[in-house]
Amino acid sequence: MHRKKRVLIAGALFITATIVSGLAFYVRADALPAEREIHITAKKFEFTPDTITLKKGEPVVLVLSSQDRKHGFHLREFGIRADVNPGETARIQFTPNKTGKFIFSCDVFCGEGHEDMTGTMVVTE
Amino acid sequence: MGEMDRRGFIKLAGLGGGIVFASSLGLNTLGSVLDYANGYAGKKVEKDFYFVQLSDTHWGFSGPKVNPDAEGTLKKAVQVVNSLEEQPDFIVFTGDLTHTTDDVQVRKDRMAQFKDIVGRLKVPTVHFMAGEHDASLDRGDAYQQFFGKLNYTFDHKDVHFIVLDNVSDPGAIVGDSQLNWLKADLKQQKPDARIVVLTHRPLFDLYPDWDWATKDGAAVIDALMPHTNVTVFYGHIHQEHHQMTGHIAHHSAKSLMFPLPAPGSVPKKAAIPWDASAPYKGLGLRNIEAQVRQAKYGITELNLSGG
């Protein structure tokens, strides 16, 4: 009889723990949504896309690649910069914390149109 | 030139805009006091002198709406310098001698043409430095074939000049190696030495969104800070600009091809179109009068129209 009771109690504890841990996982997954990937391609002398719209507080990953030569990606307002080398992918995790329009630019001199190689990041509420 | 003839210099200054800093009128007494304080008393101090700064000539650029006289502007500048009543001790070109091109042979052709034109300057001593248009695509390879080293020093009448390269790395840095070279050179200088830094990009963050900065420029300024008499002359931004970082003054020069808007004044940086009612507006060169004892530099802007 005692043994049966112990088995029942152990079983109840196991089920409770399973429910609680499952609930915890559910809450955690809900709190940390999957990061959206934004793919940006650089080539002389443009970024594609050259306008990116994000929501404030939305975590994203900027995935940067080059189609020709070395470029740079500089989003000064958020302190973000990366080299963008051909044959490589640069990934930048980023959560915009303010709204507005922000310029990003190539900061590695790449030729005559280098100074026109810019884009705009639009962050909305 | 020998001793500066003040009246001659003021007359010469009348060619262009005003003198940014007052000439030494009334400062000689103060200068003597400073000489004593700085340990210059009793030492023979060299005479004042002046040099000419030309910048951003962009030889090879083509854009009739921006400069319909793209092939004549540099030649005109050479004429202006050659016609100065008092010839300068030397001339400096602070980068972007040529306009960039991916074609290596065209780059070399432009450099050869540029060198031929400025070879007509009467003044025998000319110090060149590179801009990103000259040197960023090949890390200064062609530039060095035509104009020599990318960073170097020279001394003139008690002033120590340091030429810094912040362009041959396309990432707009001076780099650790050159920074160490700079620190070693500065160790040889007294704390009150008269030091002039010549470079292309601004060493401070003037407007990084427009590439108007040197990424490790703060490290350069930190290295210079212990020296009490440092002035920087640079180009790159195609307009006059004057800024202090602590006690260090930074002065940018106009271009000799096209002017650019004030930092951040428009959403997108673009050359200011040619004004047919005022040809060569926004373009120019400058005389820099070095007042060695006072460690001051009088800047006189000269335009190309002679008025």
Image (cartoon, coloured by chain):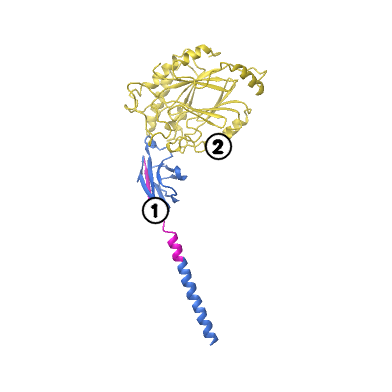
Residue B12, given in percent of the width and then of the height, sits at: 47, 14
Say which residue appears at 62% left-offset and 31% top-offset.
B187
Say which residue appears at 40% left-offset and 33% top-offset.
B265
Q: Between marks 1 and 2, how big is the CA–CA gap?
A: 35 Å
Q: Colour of chain A?
A: blue
Residue A84, given in percent of the width and then of the height, sits at: 42, 45
Q: Chain of mark 1?
A: A
Residue B200, given in percent of the width and then of the height, sits at: 47, 30
Determine whether the residue tagged by mark 2 lies in a helix, strand or loop: helix
Q: Which residues are magenta?
A: A25-44
Q: For residue A41: magenta? A: yes
User: Residue B146's quadrant in the figure?
Assistant: top left
Please name the residue that numbered disc 2 is placed on: B219
Q: Nearer the viewer, residue B194 or B13?
A: B13
User: Residue B115's quadrant in the figure?
Assistant: top left
Q: Give the residue type that dot 1 points to.
A: Glu
Residue A121, given in percent of the width and then of the height, sits at: 39, 45
Determine whether the residue tagged by mark 1 lies in a helix, strand or loop: strand
Q: Which chain is yellow?
A: B
Q: Nearer the viewer, residue B28 or B46?
A: B28
Extreme residue in the bottom direction: A1
